[in-house]
Image (tube, rainbow, N blue to C red):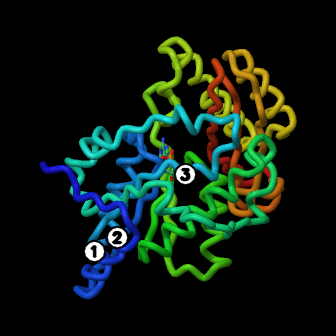
Amino acid sequence: MPAPAVVTTVEALRGVVAGWRRNGQRVALVPTMGALHAGHLALVAEARRAANRTVVSIFVNPTQFAPHEDLATYPRNLEGDLGALSPTDVDLVFAPQVGEMYPEGASTVVTVGGPSEGLESVARPHFFAGVATVVAKLLIQCAADVAVFGEKDFQQLAVVRRMARDLSIPTAILGLPTVREPSGLALSSRNAYLSAEDRARASGLHAALTDAAGAIGSGQPAVEALTRAAARIEASGFTLDYVELRDAETLQPFDPSSGRPGRLLAAARIAGVRLIDNVPVTIAPGIA
Ligand code: AMP
């Protein structure tokens, strides 16, 4: 199958999308930073189910990286990404340069409160302003009916939902479950930084979260389950940033008696690579 068509300007993107709209077609957007893997392709497959036309954006967004983070080394391979998208029937790839997304003098930043607070924001205080700004721009530029995101970045998904609601952006936000290696390790572009050995050890993060979620779901006190999870994550070779139990929607601290779904979220570093993961927590009936 041929590689999908690529546009690099907002004007060209708008032109193509306007043509589809005139024909009454629904448009889905999948925002990515490239280095595409099977997790991204699952989002694309969902987008194709949700709309008539699918746009994938590929943009390594500088404003969500702190100066000490991996902006310079983040894997970039547009040719490889277009090859990965070839079998998927994506209609268009939007791959702008930094100057197209942030023209000279750009001074507008979208900051989201609520679900941005805590968790990732502790280690990465500028991260969600960068994400919310670029995603708001992409949703407006593409005028998508629906945009698809991964639960792998669970707090990001909550922030994007909040932002789209608060700014009245008429794009439905869809979240999809995390795609994992058979070991349980969540697929991530940053896994490419890990040696085979560290990658094997990194599966301990998901194993610890899954066990703790099961224990909490069957009535074990959360503090005990979280303490054990933290010890297990560190025993796998990680330095832990956080492991926390939150309300799955608001991301506020979780009350097991609320009858609401919970979420266990963690971030940890192994061999200098920071990984995040999360799993659902369902309290068994009659437990709380
Ligand atoms: P990224 O290119 O890493 O910024 O991610 C682009 C989108 O892909 C985001 O919505 C991520 O949540 C999603 N994503 C990344 N990894 C996975 C995965 N393993 N499973 C499902 N979605 C993912």
The quadrant holding residue 234 is top right
40 lies left or right of 260: left
Q: Amino acid type of disc 2?
A: Leu
The quadrant holding residue 212 is top right
Q: Residue at x 35, y 68 (%)?
A: 50
The circle on residue 16 is 1
SS category of the residue bearing label 3: loop
Q: Residue at x 46, y 57 (%)?
A: 31
Which residue position holds label 2?
13
Disc 3 packing (10 Å; few <14; some 14–19; many ≥20):
some
Whether label 2 touches label 1, CB < 8 Å:
yes
Q: Amino acid type of disc 3?
A: Asn
Chain-order first, disc 3 or disc 2: 2
Q: Position of residue 2 (x, y in %)?
A: 14, 50
Return the residue found at the far front. 104
Q: Is residue 175 above or below residue 178?
A: below
Return the residue found at the far top. 197
